[in-house]
Image (cartoon, rainbow, N blue to C red):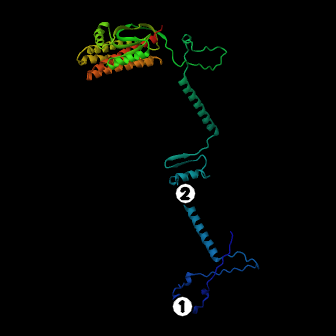
Amino acid sequence: MNKTRITYRLDNQAEKPLERISQEERKRVVPLYEDEFRVVNEGRPLPEYTTDYGAWNSPIDAETKRIEQLIRESNMSTIKKKPPRANEDLSVYEIEQRFRHEEYSENSTHTTSGTMYMRRNIPWFKVAGTAVGAVVTGILLGYLILTMFTGDNPPQDKTAITDDTKAITDDAPKEVSVTLPSEVQAGVIPVQIPARTYTFLQNGGFSTQERADQAGADIRNQGIAAVTEAADKFFVYVGVAVDRNSALTLSEQLQTKNLEIYKKPYSLPALQEMKWNGNAEFLQTYCTQADQLVQMLSGITLVHLEESELTAISDSTLQSIQSNFETWTQTSSQVFNDATADIKPTLQKLTNAMNTAKLSLDEYKKSPSFEMLWQTQTNILQFIITEKALLTDIASV
């Protein structure tokens, strides 16, 4: 322990003579009896060094050390006399600390609050075995999952391989990239779609698109239907009927408006085979239901176009048309799903034309007008012309 020098500067008032102390200062002095104090004479010789007097120890320091020693001894006696606490009185932290000291053996068991704590050395081979078992289990689970998702590929029928698939020779590498066609080609399937014939009211045939468009615009300005078909010529049609007799009266009315009208049979081809990758029955049903709707819509419009004063359509007739229209719509969605990408635009045109014809007739029911009747006729003409184009595209020959 390093000792430092402490210099005390004493006040000279302590050396005052007794006669100079005032009466008030004497009253502040507390007298001590003989049994209240003890005189200790501890003489300490002065060091005999001439130049270095060494570290000076004050009696106060010695008394302080003695008091500190007494305090330490009293605390140690209290600690030794205090019995050790049971495990039930210890906290979890204190129990963990006890396990780290030598007073508890490595294999000893201690119970606290009804819970058993045990510490043992785990052999290294058990740790290694657990790790190896976890790795093997992971590999087995991964293999099982891959097997579930991939499965065994069934043997392929060699006769079902098309020309688009490249043959793999014995000298070819094991990894071969096969390029599939962007669009699945439709196969040729048998079908029974009969021919159908309607009567078109034709205004004329023109050699150029411009003349046909001009004639159609003049007819539409009079509030009459006008649809152009591009074939060997550009034909302009103004109406449709199921047969020649039904179209006779309408033809005479149109001629009174200075229009040249020709009754022309318009036929849709019959199909026994077609290029299709779906169900043939759906397409057959589609064409049959479409023919029924065309006859109903064209017939009801012709009846009211011949009237001098328009009358309303009966509810029973509209209900029958609505029922057939809903049935055809369901079949149309099935045919659309089976069609290839190049055929779907044509099917969409057919759907739009039939929907517009039905809506025009519904508007006529609300407010009868010749405009709605001719609008229905226009969309029926567009539907029949588009259907002929569809049958021509899917025909096998």
Crowdedness of circle 1 by 10 Å Cα count: few (<14), some, many (20+)? few
Q: Quadrant of residue 392?
A: top left
Q: Which mark is residue 353?
A: none
Taking the spot 54% from the left edge, 21% from the top edge, the residue there is 151
**Mark 2, mark 1: which one is toward the viewer?**
1
Q: Nearer the viewer, residue 102 or 184?
A: 184
Q: Nearer the viewer, residue 275 or 165?
A: 275
Say which element carries label 2. loop
Taking the spot 64% from the left edge, 77% from the top edge, the residue there is 59
Q: Nearer the viewer, residue 76 or 164?
A: 164
Q: What residue is pinned by disc 2?
A: 84
Q: Quadrant of residue 222?
A: top left
Asked whether the beta carbons under mark 2 and mark 1 sit within 8 Å of each other, the answer is no
Residue 87, given in percent of the width and then of the height, sits at 53, 52
Q: Amino acid at mark 1?
A: Ser
Q: Nearer the viewer, residue 88 or 240?
A: 240
Q: In the image, is residue 115 above or below residue 305?
A: below
Say which element carries label 1. loop
Q: Amino acid at mark 2?
A: Pro
Q: What residue is pinned by disc 1?
A: 22
Q: Residue furthest bottom?
A: 19
Q: Is residue 149 visible?
A: yes
Crowdedness of circle 2 by 10 Å Cα count: few (<14), some, many (20+)? few
Q: Quadrant of the N terminus?
A: bottom right
Q: Which of marks 1 and 2 precedes in the sequence?
A: 1
Q: How many marks?
A: 2
